[in-house]
Image (cartoon, rainbow, N blue to C red):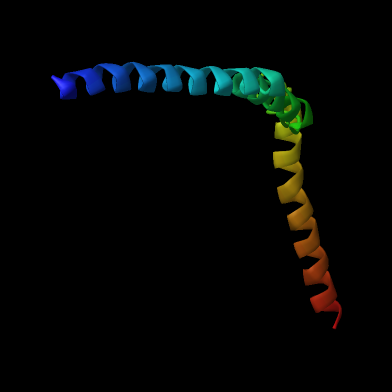
């Protein structure tokens, strides 16, 4: 009988003490004004402002295709220049 009486007194006292400690921790957290979710959101916003801008990615739409005449002119000009240089080298060799 004595044991139950002690238990019936101790258990409610522990519950009241636990509730008081919980209430005190809640009030000190609210007074500090520090909300972890809000802090994380502020930090993410600052990081986004300070982030480097992405570089330009060029696609086929951005680059103009080369004209067919320019490619043909470049292809035909190269062999004639090479043959002209070869002719000059032969003439120089003959003159010696």
Q: Is residue 54 above or below residue 91?
A: above
On the image, the x and y values in percent for residue 34 come to: 67, 23
Q: Position of residue 38 (x, y in %)?
A: 65, 19
Q: Residue furthest front?
A: 2
The residue positioned farthest toward the bottom in the image shown: 96
The foreground one among 35 and 63 is: 35
Hey, which quadrant is residue 65 in on the image?
top right
Q: Quadrant of residue 92?
A: bottom right
**Residue 67 visible in the snapshot:** no
- Residue drawn 80% across and 61% down? 85
Q: Quadrant of the N terminus?
A: top left
37 lies left or right of 3: right
Q: Nearer the viewer, residue 35 or 57?
A: 35
**In the figure, 81 relative to 95: above or below?**
above
> What is the quadrant of the C terminus in the image?
bottom right
* Number of numbered markers: 0
Up-down: is 61 above or below 74?
above
Q: Nearer the viewer, residue 47 or 87?
A: 47
Residue at 76% over, 49% down: 80
Depth check, front residue: 90 or 78: 78
Residue drawn at the location 72% of the way across and 40% of the way down: 76
**Name of the residue lying farthest toward the left:** 1
For the point 76% across and 29% down, the residue is 53
Residue 61: horizontal and vertical position, in percent? Answer: 68, 18
């Amino acid at each position: 009988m004595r044991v139950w009486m002690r238990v019936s007194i101790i258990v409610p006292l522990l519950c009241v003490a636990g509730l008081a400690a919980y209430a005190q921790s809640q009030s000190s957290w609210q007074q500090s004004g520090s909300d972890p979710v809000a802090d994380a959101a502020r930090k993410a916003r600052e990081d986004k402002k300070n982030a480097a801008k992405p570089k330009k990615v060029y696609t086929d739409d951005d680059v103009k295709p080369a004209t067919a005449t320019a490619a043909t002119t470049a292809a035909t000009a190269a062999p004639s220049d090479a043959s002209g240089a070869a002719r000059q080298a032969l003439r120089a060799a003959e003159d010696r």
